[in-house]
Image (tube, rainbow, N blue to C red):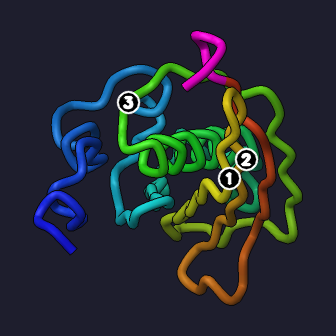
Amino acid sequence: MTDSDTPAARAFDPKLLFGGRFGGHGGRLGIVYHDHGDDWAELALPYHSDLIGDEASGVIASGPILALMDMATSVGVWRKLDAFKGHATLDLRIDYLRPARPGQTVIGRGECYRITRSIAFVRGQAHDGDPNDPLAHVAGTFMAVEGYW
């Protein structure tokens, strides 16, 4: 292994992307960096009263969780490519297994497991403290914006 093969030498670092003030939809939701590997990323969605979908239960609405998973899988694609390349969500299926526990931060882990000439295939899960008790699973595809990576 050479120095250029080590994870520290990789070109795309999600910590830098999320290190500053992150704007847009994810910034408004409060999504922050949590962890990453060579082909995956974890982002966190801290609990906040603005995200509650049902006042009576205090449960986070499904939309912010879907946004979290879209972003986590997207960052997984950038990690796999080792570059910040334009792409669009082509398909993202989310299966909700249970509601998030009120008051808990939701962690979304997205993995890019295959890249073809123009499509990236992703999967992931969201949990609120125990990865062995997920609240949602996702599977999807992203399309290269320029037609190819």
User: Is tag 3's residue or tag 1's residue first in the polypeptide sequence?
Assistant: 3
Label 1 environment density (alpha carbons within 10 Å; few <14, some 14–19, many ≥20): few
Q: Is residue 38 left or right of residue 7?
A: right
Q: Which residue in the protein does label 3 denote?
A: 84
Residue found farthest to the front: 2
Span shown in magenta = 144-149
When asked about the image quadrant of residue 85, the answer is top left
Q: CA distance from mark 2 to mark 3?
A: 16 Å
**Identity, as a three-letter code, of the amino acid under mark 1:** Arg
Residue type at numbered disc 2: Phe
Q: Secondary structure at mark 2?
A: strand
Residue at position x 46%, y 33% in the image: 26
- Mark toward the start of the polypeptide (2 vs 3): 3
**61 or 94: nearer the eye?**
94
**Neighbours of disc 3 within 10 Å: few (<14), some (14-19), many (20+):** some
Q: Secondary structure at mark 1?
A: strand
Tell me: 18 left or right of 123: left
Would you place residue 116 above or below residue 5 in this image?
A: above
Query: In percent of the image, x 49 and y 65: which residue is there?
Result: 105
130 or 2, which is in the foreground?
Answer: 2
Please name the residue that numbered disc 1 is placed on. 114
Foreground mark, 2 or 1, reads 1
User: Label 3 sits on what residue type?
Assistant: Phe
Identify the element where label 3 is drawn. loop
Distance of label 2 from label 1 (alpha carbons): 5 Å
